[in-house]
Image: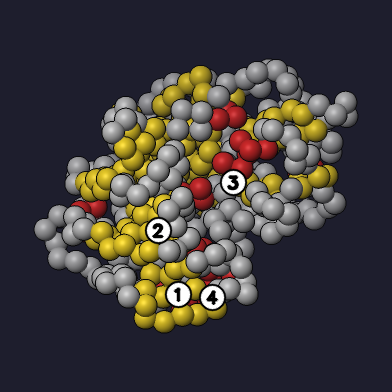
Amino acid sequence: MSHPIDPQQPTHDHDHDPLDPTDARIDALARAAGGELRRPAPPDGIARARRTRRNRLVMRTALSGTAAIAFVAVGVVALRSGDDSVTVVPVDAVSTTDVSVPAPEPTAGPTTVPASQPTVGAPSTIYTVTGDPTDPSGTQTLLDPLTGEVVGSSPIDVELAQAAQADLPGGVRSTVDLGDVAYDFRQVVYDGGTLDTDVFTDVDLCGQNVVTVRSAAGSALPERAHVLSVSPDDRYVVTLSSVCPEAGTMGADGTGTSIPFEATLQVFDARHPELAGQTLLTGIDALNVGVTTFSADGRFVAMETFSDQQYRVFDLESGDELDLAGGCSVSGPVYSRFIGPWIGASSIAVVRACADGRQLLVRDLATGDELVVPAPSATTGDGDLRAEVDHAHFDTPSNAWFLLCSTAQQTCWVGHGDDGLVELAEVTDASFLPLGFYPGG
């Protein structure tokens, strides 16, 4: 059935009920923390980013306590019931029992850039810091990415850093008007240790919110979902949903079900929501899912899972699942918690932990062009390789600029394709963007 969209639906600003920060499962929630939804970067970059002010459907971030966690219908929420037990419910999934394949309208194939194309430019500055990269009283040192030499310094600017990150391309599109068809999916917001429990009057006991579709032909999408995202090219809608084992809504107290349930990942034709969807994956632990995001060309979708440290990646034109792991565990680069692991039109960037060491992998899923950079020998232990790929000057994986950092060694490296690494010694953080705001709060 179709559901009319009410553009006058009010937003709420009520008192919050605090979550118990001592609950062990809060650690799992932090990994699913998101940030503001993003859009493509403007040509004048950081200068314009300083002036940028946006209202996003995503989340508000509170810098309170030792770690603020922000959720945008991606991940899970822990809810405390009246008997002081904790129930964990997903905030980011969708379901339906239909398993047919959608028939999206024909479109031209993805535009790709040949690997032989000359460089599209290079970053002029690497921002580094020794100490806390979010300390507003601190100073960041600017380095030349070619030589690692100091070229200047500037105060840490939290506002500028957050605005620059807001201009990164990608994110989740959950409210989209295509003319004859429109989608409206309200995100459940977790705000720095508190929940606006008023929103739970519409959320079912499994943490799913209402999916609203405006379409004269009707809708085959699930009526409720954990996650809904529309591709950047408006071809596809992906949902993660569950058949909740208990009826009813959470109500103002935010109490969810403690009965186990599983989620289903599906894809639909965005311009023909009346057509049955194709099931990509079933039996998903909804509490184990992070962000589900599209590549910029709309052809590929990636769903992050935590327990097995993987990205489940699908080619929506063929319906095939693509293997990025190659027997390794996989995590995303620095900004993947809110924009996904995507870079360029159809490329993906991940950090792989393999039996023979850790590595940065950047691969164009449409062309097969890829860059594999083994971790420098100074990195040690699980998780001791943080990676960032430069969005502003990316055309192909083999021509990518990237940063690798070792937390244990307080050393970072900047690289360009297979040219070799330039060491940035005695720094605790380095970025192609100004420092001062940490992704997710």
- Residue 76 at x, y percent in the picture: 63, 36
- Left or right, 173 with reference to 186: left
> Label 3 to label 2, Cα distance in Å?
26 Å
> Label 4 to label 2, Cα distance in Å?
18 Å
Q: Residue type at mark 2?
A: Thr
Which residue is label 4 attached to? 139
**Is the Cβ of the residue at disc 1 closer than 8 Å to that at disc 4?**
yes
- Residue 291 at x, y percent in the picture: 51, 41
What residue do we see at 41% from left, 75% from top?
142
- Residue 282 at x, y percent in the picture: 48, 21
> Element under label 3?
loop
> Label 2 to label 1, Cα distance in Å?
14 Å
> Element under label 4?
strand
What residue do we see at 74% from left, 23% from top?
257
Which residue is label 3 attached to? 33
For marks 1 and 3 on the same chain, the one whose residue lies earlier in the sequence? 3
Which residue is label 2 attached to? 411
Is disc 1 surrounded by few (<14), some (14 to 19) or many (20+) residues within 10 Å? many
